[in-house]
């Protein structure tokens, strides 16, 4: 016998509650997380939009965000140095992957960034926490003092803080654990977040055709794009100082200027599921296609190239530039870390723990690539 679905409830705020019956002691939590991830991928496949090149004007005036300083979130446990698990990763110039188990079980780490303090900061979506790990493996977890916070994306930003999206808010956390939430008076769930060169923060919305811009003075402007059906999933700054984003429902890559001018380019293959995006060392934007099992790149003029991945690198998700000048990415379904050179040479490095489901990856000041393992409940690093 296994796990049986009991009910699915969607309330007025579009919050989803899924209940299971647990038969013969079979654990359900990881099954649930995997099921939700599968539903999200399926939903992306069902949506479509046409490529568009349009200019959009922001709302007439910026509105003040409602900022609320929350209590300093005491670490859930005293900061500790976790014993690393070291494993040979094989060929290609990389001979070691190190992993660190998280103190909170089944916390589902989802996104990771290098912080202003030289440490790595990450979201723990299922646990409602922000985590910090030093290059030596010392982990501290901070709970977000709001129920059902579910943090999603995270980035270094203004004020020497780390900024993240959670539930219907944007949040920031200082290196001492002071959390501030910023409400923009809408019920939409915040998604990807990125800091622009002018000090503004840009935030995508998971369930609507909008992008929010937040200024250092806590003012925001909503760019309303319903007629063009654009969805900003993950966002990055391009070499042209414009904001570039992936649009999974529209199967496209989009670009927006700080003035609100938007343009998008349809991907060559239908149902590619563009996921994460980063600025490459060659002046192009590089992105993952989680459903198409490809790595793509686009010039600032809109010329797209794609590279097919082997089965060992299926389900590409996070992507970043390494200190070696190559692109490094996670392969959630292939349970590997991938490397691709700018001319398309691909190498795979299998993770030691099966079914780890690596999600996001970032370059760190220590010269390594750090990544999160959503199902493995670990933080890992790989030497380039």
Image: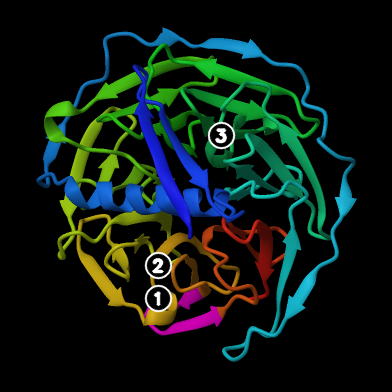
Residue 173 in the image: x percent, y percent? 68, 29
Q: Which residue is mark 2?
A: 282
Label 3 vs 2, first from the N-terminus: 3
Query: Is residue 189 visible from the viewing direction of this image?
Result: yes
Q: Is residue 140 left or right of residue 156?
A: right
Residue 319 in the image: x percent, y percent? 47, 61
Whether pointer 2 and pointer 1 mark residues with C-beta atoms closer than 8 Å, the reply is yes
Which region of the structure is painted magenta? 338-349
For the point 27% across and 61% down, which residue is it? 298
Label 2 vs 1, first from the N-terminus: 2
Vertical side of 341 occupied by 245: above or below: above
Residue 343 in the image: x percent, y percent? 36, 81
For marks 2 and 1, give the CA distance. 7 Å
Q: Quadrant of residue 287?
A: bottom left
Q: Which residue is mark 3?
A: 164
**Which class describes the residues within 10 Å of circle 1: few (<14), some (14-19), or many (20+)?**
some
Q: Which residue is mark 1?
A: 342
Q: Quadrant of residue 157?
A: top right
Query: Is residue 326 visible from the viewing direction of this image?
Result: no
Confirm whether the magenta stretch covers residue 298.
no
**Mark 3 residue element:** strand
The quadrant of the image that shows the C terminus is bottom right
For marks 3 and 1, give the CA distance. 30 Å
- 56, 170: nearer the viewer: 170
- 159, 18: nearer the viewer: 18
Residue 292 in the image: x percent, y percent? 27, 67
């Amino acid at each position: 016998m296994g796990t049986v679905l009991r009910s699915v409830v969607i309330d007025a705020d579009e919050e989803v509650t899924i209940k299971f019956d647990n038969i013969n002691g079979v654990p359900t939590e990881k099954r649930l997380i995997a099921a939700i991830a599968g539903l999200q991928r399926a939903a992306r496949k069902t949506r479509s939009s046409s490529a568009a090149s349009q200019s959009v004007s922001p709302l007439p005036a910026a509105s003040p965000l409602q900022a609320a300083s929350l209590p300093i979130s005491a670490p859930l446990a005293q900061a500790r140095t976790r014993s690393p698990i070291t494993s040979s990763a094989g060929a290609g110039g990389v001979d070691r992957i190190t992993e660190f188990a998280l103190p909170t079980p089944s916390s589902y780490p989802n996104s990771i960034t290098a912080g202003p303090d030289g440490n790595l900061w990450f979201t723990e979506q299922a646990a409602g926490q922000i985590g910090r790990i030093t290059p030596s493996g010392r982990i501290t977890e901070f709970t977000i003092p709001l129920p059902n916070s579910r943090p999603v994306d995270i980035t270094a930003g203004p004020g020497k803080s780390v900024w993240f999206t959670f539930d219907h808010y944007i949040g920031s956390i200082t290196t001492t654990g002071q959390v501030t939430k910023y409400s923009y008076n809408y019920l939409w769930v915040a998604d990807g977040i990125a800091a622009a060169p002018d000090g503004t923060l840009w935030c995508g919305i998971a369930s609507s055709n909008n992008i929010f811009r937040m200024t250092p003075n806590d003012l925001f402007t909503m760019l309303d794009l319903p007629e063009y059906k654009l969805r900003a999933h993950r966002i990055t700054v391009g070499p042209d100082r414009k904001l570039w984003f992936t649009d999974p429902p529209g199967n496209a890559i989009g670009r927006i200027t700080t003035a609100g001018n938007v343009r998008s380019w349809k991907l060559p293959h239908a149902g590619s599921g563009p996921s994460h995006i980063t600025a490459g060392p060659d002046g192009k934007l590089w992105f993952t296609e989680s459903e198409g099992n490809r790595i793509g790149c686009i010039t600032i003029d809109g010329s797209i190239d794609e590279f097919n991945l082997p089965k060992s690198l299926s389900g590409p998700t996070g992507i970043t530039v390494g200190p070696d000048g190559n692109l490094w990415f996670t392969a959630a379904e292939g349970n590997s870390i991938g490397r691709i050179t700018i001319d398309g040479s691909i190498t795979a490095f299998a993770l030691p723990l099966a079914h780890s489901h690596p999600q996001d990856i970032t370059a760190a000041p220590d010269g390594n690539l750090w990544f999160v393992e959503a199902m493995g409940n670990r933080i890992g690093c790989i030497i380039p």
